[in-house]
Structures are given as structure tokens and as C-alpha cells.
């Protein structure tokens, strides 16, 4: 014991009334660094010990409010800016729908952060060794006794005086508690193998239970009843409609968003005469045309539109686009071939948007001029 | 310290005569304005009368609930001032009288009482098995009878205990409270459905009963808190009420302010999300014209302001702050009832004039008078209650 440092003097009482009385007397005597340990919270203890109101509440307020504002920003940014989806016909910034989430995060942030603050700031986690741990005193106050512990750190502390004072209060089992500086500050009980393996067991149990619940239990009757819903599911049969299909055809004449019906179906000459390229040639437009041409056309037509397919005879080679005929075609006539295809060449209207098709046309014009340059190109 | 035999010494002190005078003055002023307003605009007055009816029901029934819950939960902290809630519950005796003018004007308030309208409306005829005048009248009588029955039974035992100090009376009241609790839950739900929700008989909301219950409890708590703090400051209660008691009252006011917001928002959000016309009518009416300002005001008056005002621990222990917010919450309950009921009278926008003044005056007058009459006849402290000493010793 001699190499150990005195932590406190402790005494035990039998009833909550006695401990309240003792706490009051100790505070009146002027002691500041003392603690009370009881098996359960005793009403009125804070007052008796003359404790100042805890500052933890302010931490909770700040954390809670941070949770509130962070969630408002998060929800707004996600649903109104980053990934706007129409849900139930509501506006993208649908504040009432955010409220439950804001509420939950506020509560979560406040409670979790408050507990962590308590652990790390007030209890100095991960150091959870305390001189009172593993003492007979602690054993007693965690079952049926009410204990007081006056610390040696207190300015008024004097071994003899405190001993007499506790005796005068009527405390029993008055004993000193010593501690080992080494043990207190170095050995962190949380890193003990026993504790770590307990954590591992908890981890396995919790994740196992979660796995079984979500992947097995949910598919066992009656938990799977929620999946049996008499609603329309796409690509499944459905009793609601006369034809027995779950999917409906769009109303006749329906046009998809951003798509204008093509006017010259089966009429290449009409397209050639009436369609004009709406794009103004620019670096960006040529770059777009090049990318799209190389992706969608070059496998058959070759990178330079000379009909040098890379398909090694698996598909008939197309003719060169440098022929007199194609060079004299209008932009609209070329556009038509891409839109509708020609003989065995398939249509590209579903892969390429209108604008992209016009860009490809411009790029083909540039390819043609590379072999058959005009007089003006050479100047 | 904790003993079941109490040694509390209590000398009964009468309330000053001025309390009675204020009560009578308010009652007369209120009645005069009301009689006059009935002559000027019968329908509008009847709607206001309905607000008054719901307000006083809240105070009376909410207080009776507080008494019953104290017995049921075995609470000790509220025993020293349980009489305040008992006296306030006596407002229930006056409530049937307030209901008479409403009943006489049933046809101008409730759309579904017109049989020709109901016959032409398939939805209303579907509901007519419940919503018809005969069954409505039967329910009204049953509600009042049950409330008054339990009021008299519970308070009689409590009063008797002052003299006999018989602990069995507490046990008997605990049993009575246990029976009363489910009856209370059902009657307050159906009363709120009958008297408020059926103003718009097409509309329905399953949470409505809870909404009215929350408001009622807040009103009863607020009225009680104000009176308790006043009495304690003026020395009418046994010295010994501490900030621990104040804190508990404040915490309940704060908790139920939050609960109101939770319920009110739940009702709003589900209706807003599903967006079904038969449910949204309620909120469409209240977002129409100048009603939208009343609706936005409700969020602040009923939730944000009392929330901020009662958030911190010291604010719940401060007598001045508690009194202010008790009165505030009482006003907020009246405001809430106005918001629930008046849009059925004037759809285009809210109406506010001298005709709306008489009813709150009468309400305050009735509460003061009932309390002062009761306090003259009975002790302000349940001196025979075995929990009294422990209640006075209560610490947080």
C-alpha cells in the first residue's frame, strides 16, 4: 500500500435519508471534491450536494440544432438540386416531407453526441479506470448501501479530520481508498482482450440477427403478408384490366417528352428537300459529331467513311460516303438515312438524339471535304 | 421522512372577496354581450357558443383526467394541490347549461341535421346511422351523465378523506379512476367527433380525438398551474411547495406542447401526403382567404412560442414565467378551438368583433366563480390524504 497514493476516505450509510443528510452536512462543512454513490438515483441529491446545474444541456442544445440545420440543408440539396425526382406530385422542395427526418436527426444528433461528449469530455474515455472500481466500497454501494467518498484532492482534506467527521456523521466502514498512478493513466480497461472479445460477440450477434430478420424472417408467413398487395405491378398479369396485363399502352397520339414526331417517314426525297441543319458549325458541335460517329457509325463505315468496315465480313460492307451521290445529297437526306436506316442499315433514331444526328451529319461533311476539298478550303 | 401518516397542520384561509367579485363582474359582462349578440346574429353566436362549450369541457374534463391519473399512477408530487384540479373539474357541472343554446341552434350549426340535405347526399346518408339527431342527443346525455357521475364519485371520496383520513378511500378512488380512464378516452374522442369534426360531416381524421384530448389536457394543466402558483405565492397552500413542484408542472406543460405539435403535424402531414380531396377539404378551408394567417399564427401561438419559453430548466421553475405561459396556453387553446370551429361559419375569411368577446369573458368568469365557490366550501388541501406529506417532501 505504501507506494500507492491516497484517493479518498469513504463511508457507508444504510438509508437514503441518512445519505441526503450526510451530503448536506459535507457540503456545509465546505468540502467541494466529494461524491455520493447510491444503488439508484436519490431525489434531491443535487440540491443537498450543492451541485451547480450541469452544462451537458447546452451541449445537447447545440448538437440538436446542428442536426436540425444539417438535415434541412441535406434534404434541400438532395431532393431539390442534386437529384430532383417527382414524388407523389409534390414540389421538389417538399418541406412537410422533410420534417420527420429533420426531427429524427435532431434527436439522434442531440442524444448520441451528448452521450459521446459525456464519455470523452467529462469521463475522459477511453480511460475508464477509477480508483473506486474493484473496491469493497463499490461492491456495497451497487447493492444496498449508500456511500460517501471525500477526496484527498480537496483543499480542506486532512486524514484525521475527515475520519472524525465521517464518524460524527454516523458513517460505517470508514476506509481509505488508494490508487496507483500507473494503473490509472496507462492501463485502459476498454482495450483488454476480454472486453474486445465481448464487443466482437455483440457485433456478430447483432449483425447475424439483422441478417436473419431482413433476409429470412421477412419471407416467412405471416411476415411476408406485406408483400402480397393487390396493386398493379409492371410486366405481371393483373385482374384489374380486361386484357389481363398489368401494363397499359399510352393513349393514342402520346408523344414522349422532348421528342418531336418525324414527319418524313418513308420519304427520303421529302426529307432531303425540306430539312435543313439547325446546328451552327462550331468546335463543340464537331467534337460531338466525331464522338457519336466513331461510336455508332465507324464500325461499319470506317473512321474515314470509306466503307472500310472493321467487322471482317460479318456484315455486308457499306458503300463509301465519298461518292458523288452522297456528296451531292443535302444535309436533310443524310439525316434521313440516320433516322430511318436504309435497306439493311438499321435506324439510329433511338440511339442518337436529333441534335446528335445533325452533329454527325456535320462531321460527315467534314470527312467528305477532307478528300474532296473545295477551292476555298485550300486558301 | 417518508411516512403514510401525515402530520401536516393546515388552517383554512378563505380567498379574498375580490376574487368572487371579479368572477361575478366577468360573468355578468359576458352574459350581457352574449344575450345581445344572440339578438344581432344568431348563427354566429351559436358557433361562438360551441367554442365556449368545447373550452369549458376541456377545462373540466381535463382536470378530472388529471385527478384520475394522479390516483392511477400513484403520483405524490401533485397531491398537495390536487384540490385545484378537483375544483376546476366542477366546471363540468356548468357545461350542460352552456350546451343548451348550442342544442337549440343545432340546425344552423350542423349541416347533417337537415334530413333533406342528407337524403340528397350519398355520403351523408351513408353516415346517417351515426349522424342523426336522436342518436346525437342520446350521446350528449350519456357523455354528460358519465362525466358528472365520475366527477361526483371521485371528488366525494376525496372530500370525505379530509375528515375520516381513511386510506381505503384512496384505494377506492384508484379503482374508480381505472374504470374512468377507458370511459374518458372513448367519450372525449366521440365528443370531439360529434361536436367539432361533424361540423364538416364529409371530412374525417382518425387522430382527431387525440388532437382535442391534447388541447384539453394542456388547458386543464395551464389553468391548474396558474392557480397553483398564485395560491402558493399568496400563502393559501401549505408552505413547502418548492421549485421542484413548479418544475414538474412546467415540464408537463412543455411536454404536452410538444405532443400537440406532434399530433397536429401528424394529422397535417398524412393528409397533405395522400392528397385525397375528401380529407384535404379541412386544410383547404383553413388555408383559404385570411384563414391562412390564423393557421400560421396557430403554429407560433400553440407551439413555437411556448416551446421556446419553457425549454430551459430555470424557465420551468420561475413563478413569473410559469404564470405567463399558463395564461398563454389557455389563450392558445381558445385560439385553437376558434381555428377548428369558426371556418365552418365563415369560409371566406376569419371574423373577429365584439360578438367574439362575450364568450371568453364568460368562460373566465365561470372558471373563477366555480373555483371560489368550491374553495369556500372545501379545503384547498387534501389534508386527509396519506400521500400529502410525501408530496410536500417531493424533490427532483
Image (cartoon, rainbow, N blue to C red):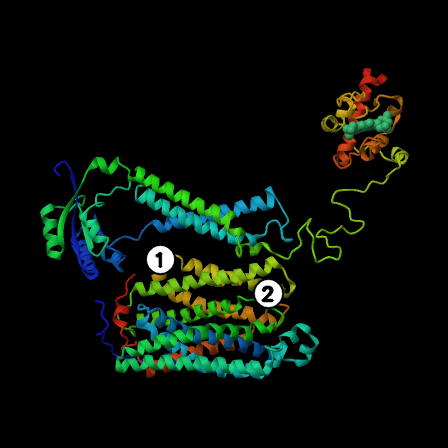
Image quadrant where residue A192 sits: top left
Numbered badge on residue B291: 2
Numbered badge on residue B313: 1
Q: Is residue A39 above or below residue B181?
A: above
Image quadrant where residue A244 sits: bottom right
Judged left or right of residue B152, residue A298 is right
Quadrant that contains the C terminus of chain B: bottom left
Secondary structure at badge 2 equals helix
Image quadrant where residue B127 sits: bottom right
Distance from the alpha carbon under mark 2 to that under mark 1:
35 Å
Whether residue B323 is visible here, answered yes or no, is: yes
Read off the chain for label 1: B
Which sits earlier in the primary sequence, circle 2 or circle 1? 2
* Label pair 2/1, CB-CB below 8 angstroms: no
Residue B197 placement (x, y as % from top left)? 57, 71
Q: Residue at x 55, y 73 (%)?
A: B193
- Do discs 2 and 1 share a chain? yes
Amino acid at each position: 500500500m505504501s507506494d500507492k497514493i491516497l484517493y479518498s476516505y469513504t463511508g457507508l450509510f444504510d438509508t437514503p435519508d441518512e445519505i441526503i443528510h450526510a451530503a448536506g452536512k459535507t457540503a456545509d462543512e465546505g468540502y467541494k471534491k466529494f461524491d455520493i454513490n447510491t444503488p439508484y438515483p436519490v431525489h434531491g441529491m443535487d440540491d443537498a450536494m450543492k451541485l451547480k446545474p450541469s452544462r451537458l444541456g447546452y451541449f445537447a442544445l447545440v448538437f440538436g440544432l446542428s442536426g436540425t440545420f444539417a438535415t434541412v440543408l441535406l434534404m434541400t440539396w438532395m431532393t431539390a438540386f442534386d437529384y430532383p425526382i417527382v414524388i407523389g406530385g409534390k414540389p421538389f422542395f417538399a418541406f412537410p416531407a422533410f420534417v420527420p427526418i429533420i426531427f429524427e436527426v435532431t434527436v439522434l444528433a442531440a442524444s448520441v453526441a451528448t452521450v459521446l461528449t459525456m464519455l470523452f469530455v467529462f469521463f475522459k474515455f477511453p480511460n475508464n479506470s477509477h480508483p473506486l472500481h474493484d473496491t469493497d466500497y463499490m461492491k456495497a454501494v451497487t447493492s444496498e448501501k449508500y456511500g460517501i467518498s471525500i477526496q484527498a484532492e480537496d483543499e480542506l482534506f486532512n486524514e484525521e479530520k475527515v475520519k472524525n467527521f465521517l464518524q460524527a456523521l454516523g458513517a460505517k466502514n470508514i476506509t481509505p481508498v488508494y490508487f496507483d498512478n500507473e494503473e490509472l493513466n496507462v492501463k485502459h480497461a476498454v482495450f483488454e482482450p476480454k472486453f474486445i472479445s465481448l464487443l466482437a460477440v455483440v457485433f456478430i450477434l447483432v449483425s447475424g440477427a439483422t441478417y436473419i430478420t431482413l433476409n429470412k424472417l421477412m419471407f416467412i408467413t405471416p411476415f411476408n403478408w406485406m408483400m402480397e398487395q393487390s396493386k398493379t405491378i409492371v410486366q405481371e398479369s393483373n385482374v384489374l384490366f380486361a386484357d389481363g396485363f398489368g401494363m397499359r399502352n399510352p393513349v393514342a397520339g402520346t408523344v414522349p417528352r422532348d421528342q418531336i414526331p418525324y414527319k418524313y417517314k418513308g420519304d427520303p426525297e421529302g426529307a432531303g428537300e425540306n430539312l435543313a441543319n439547325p446546328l451552327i458549325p462550331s468546335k463543340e458541335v464537331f467534337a460531338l459529331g466525331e464522338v457519336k460517329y466513331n461510336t455508332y457509325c465507324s464500325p461499319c463505315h470506317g473512321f474515314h467513311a470509306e466503307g472500310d468496315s472493321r467487322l471482317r465480313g460479318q456484315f455486308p460492307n457499306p458503300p463509301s460516303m465519298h461518292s458523288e451521290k452522297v456528296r451531292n445529297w443535302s444535309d436533310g437526306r443524310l439525316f434521313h438515312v440516320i433516322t430511318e436506316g436504309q435497306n439493311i442499315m438499321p435506324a439510329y433514331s433511338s440511339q442518337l438524339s436529333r441534335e446528335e444526328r445533325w452533329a454527325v451529319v456535320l462531321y460527315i461533311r467534314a470527312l467528305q471535304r477532307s478528300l474532296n476539298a473545295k477551292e476555298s478550303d485550300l486558301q | 421522512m417518508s411516512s403514510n401518516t401525515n402530520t401536516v397542520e393546515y388552517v383554512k384561509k378563505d380567498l379574498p372577496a375580490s376574487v368572487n367579485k371579479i368572477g361575478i363582474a366577468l360573468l355578468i359582462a359576458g352574459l350581457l354581450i352574449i344575450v345581445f349578440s344572440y339578438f344581432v346574429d344568431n348563427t354566429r353566436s351559436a358557433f361562438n357558443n360551441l367554442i365556449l362549450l368545447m373550452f369549458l369541457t376541456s377545462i373540466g374534463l381535463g382536470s378530472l383526467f388529471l385527478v384520475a391519473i394522479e390516483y392511477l399512477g400513484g403520483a405524490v408530487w401533485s397531491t398537495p394541490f390536487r384540490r385545484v384540479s378537483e375544483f376546476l373539474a366542477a366546471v363540468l357541472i356548468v357545461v350542460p347549461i352552456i350546451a343548451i343554446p348550442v342544442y337549440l341552434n343545432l340546425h344552423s350549426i350542423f349541416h347533417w341535421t337537415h334530413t333533406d340535405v342528407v337524403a340528397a347526399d350519398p355520403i351523408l346518408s351513408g353516415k346517417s346511422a351515426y349522424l342523426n339527431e336522436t342518436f346525437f342527443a342520446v350521446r350528449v346525455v350519456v357523455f354528460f351523465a358519465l362525466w358528472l357521475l365520475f366527477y361526483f364519485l371521485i371528488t366525494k371520496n376525496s372530500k370525505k378523506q379530509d375528515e375520516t383520513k381513511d386510506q381505503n378511500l384512496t384505494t377506492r378512488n384508484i379503482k374508480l379512476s381505472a374504470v374512468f380512464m377507458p370511459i374518458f378516452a372513448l367519450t372525449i374522442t366521440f365528443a370531439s367527433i360529434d361536436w367539432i369534426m361533424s361540423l364538416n360531416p364529409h371530412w374525417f381524421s382518425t387522430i382527431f380525438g387525440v388532437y382535442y384530448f391534447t388541447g384539453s389536457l394542456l388547458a386543464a394543466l395551464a389553468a391548474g398551474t396558474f392557480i397553483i402558483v398564485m395560491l402558493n405565492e399568496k400563502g393559501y397552500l401549505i408552505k413547502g411547495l418548492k421549485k421542484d413542484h413548479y418544475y414538474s408542472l412546467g415540464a408537463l406543460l412543455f411536454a404536452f406542447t410538444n405532443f400537440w405539435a406532434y399530433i397536429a403535424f401528424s394529422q397535417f402531414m398524412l393528409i397533405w401526403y395522400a392528397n385525397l380531396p375528401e380529407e384535404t377539404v379541412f386544410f383547404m378551408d383553413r388555408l383559404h382567404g385570411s384563414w391562412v394567417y390564423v393557421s400560421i399564427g396557430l403554429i407560433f401561438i400553440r407551439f413555437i412560442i411556448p416551446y421556446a419559453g419553457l425549454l430551459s430548466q430555470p424557465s420551468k421553475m420561475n413563478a413569473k414565467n410559469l404564470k405567463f405561459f399558463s395564461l398563454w396556453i389557455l389563450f392558445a387553446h381558445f385560439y385553437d378551438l376558434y381555428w377548428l370551429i369558426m371556418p365552418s361559419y365563415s369560409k371566406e375569411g376569419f371574423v373577429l368583433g365584439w360578438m367574439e368577446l362575450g364568450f371568453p369573458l364568460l368562460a373566465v368568469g365561470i372558471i373563477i366563480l366555480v373555483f371560489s365557490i368550491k374553495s369556500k366550501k372545501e379545503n384547498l388541501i387534501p389534508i386527509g390524504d396519506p400521500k400529502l406529506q410525501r408530496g410536500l417532501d417531493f424533490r427532483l
